[in-house]
Amino acid sequence: MKYLGKAKVLKLFLISLFLGMVFSCQPQRKEEKKEEFFAAARVKVWKVKKQRISERLSFTGTIQAWKKITITPDIAGKVSNIYVEEGDRVKKGQLLAELDTRSIRLQIEQGEAALAAAEANYKDAKRNMERMERLKEENAVSEQQYEKVKLAFEAAEAQLQQAQAALNLARHNFEVSMMRAPFDGIIASKNAEVGDVINPMMAGFSPTSGVLTLVDFSKVKIEFEVSSKDIVRFKKGQRALLKIESFPEKVFEGRITIVNSAADPVTKKFKVEVVAENPELIIRPNTFGEVTIEVSTRDDALVIPQEAILDNSYVFLVKGNKAEKREVKLGLQNTGMVEVLSGVNEGELVIVEGNYGLKEGVEIEILEEGK
């Protein structure tokens, strides 16, 4: 029993010694103070300056030819000739097409003959009337005889006028059967063929049912609608800029020609029309175009890029090597720049890139400065 007690004590001693050696081999951990390190925010800046700024409004619409007309005769008839094709350029007064005029020519011949007969009858009646007036002055004829000759003269005069009117009508019908260009332009479409019967008085006849369509797009027009809030900012003669997809780098200058004073009863908007010069016929009708109009301009405004504005209310400026948040009041704006009425001063550096998520007082590193 005594031996067993000594063995137990020895065993506990060895265990204690082993544990002591294990813990003594462990490297002692020194409590180190951790320091947080934040890199400077890398930003691009822009120097605040004064310059001219214009507020622009843009609208999209369909481009139309300045002049467009459907060539249609005033009377009914059969198309006998069409002298042009689609795409042909024509001059004012040029004969484009004509109706069959054989019956009208006969009417003219008939009218000329009737007029000649009426003129001869009138001359004879006039001579009789002059003779009768002399005899009446001499009291050589009765009142009844005088009245009879007078009535004959008046009838001959009326017949002459009627014959002249009939001939004028026949000549008019002949003239309007000849379809001529009312202005210089290009044949946009051919709506009929030789042999077709045209009757503008027929029910169902539409403005596009004529023989030809003539357009002049040496100028073009584009219409768009404006809200009641913005219509007061437009006026006739105001400058406008037109861009088209075919030539994205080219800008065409135009002017406002129409500003409606009454709103559309359905849309409650106002129609505005812009006309632009197109001497080289680059702009084609029935394509889309974008009109931009300067509605407000300030020549000596304090401006910064749109990218600098956050939440439409504040910016970050560079103060030393840190960012400073500044509340701003804005004025005129366009797609690139914005006028600052208060909050920044000329010459200060405003952050235009790297400003999202930036905080007041954060250290910054300027990568690029714009002017």
Image (spheres, helix red, strand yellow):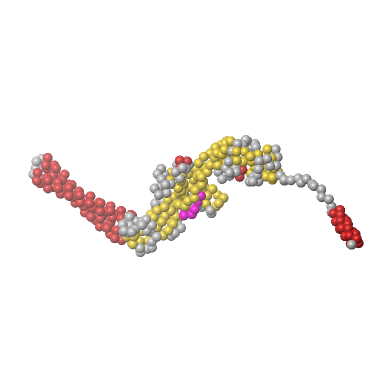
Q: Nearer the viewer, residue 279 or 47?
A: 47
Q: Which quadrant of the rendered structure holds the N terminus?
A: bottom right
Residue 180: horizontal and vertical position, in percent? 38, 54
Point out the stretch of residues depicted in magenta.
284-290
Which residue lies at the image location 40% right of the left edge and 58% below the top edge? 212
Residue 344: horizontal and vertical position, in percent? 61, 36
Q: Nearer the viewer, residue 186 or 330?
A: 330
Which residue lies at the image location 42% right of the left edge and 49% below the top edge? 267
Residue 343 lies left or right of residue 106; in this view the side is: right
Q: Is residue 255 magenta?
A: no
Which residue lies at the image location 44% right of the left edge and 43% below the top edge? 228
Q: Is residue 161 visible?
A: yes
Q: Nearer the viewer, residue 214 or 208?
A: 208
How many numbered discs? 0
Residue 136 lies left or right of residue 8; in this view the side is: left
Residue 268: horizontal and vertical position, in percent? 42, 47
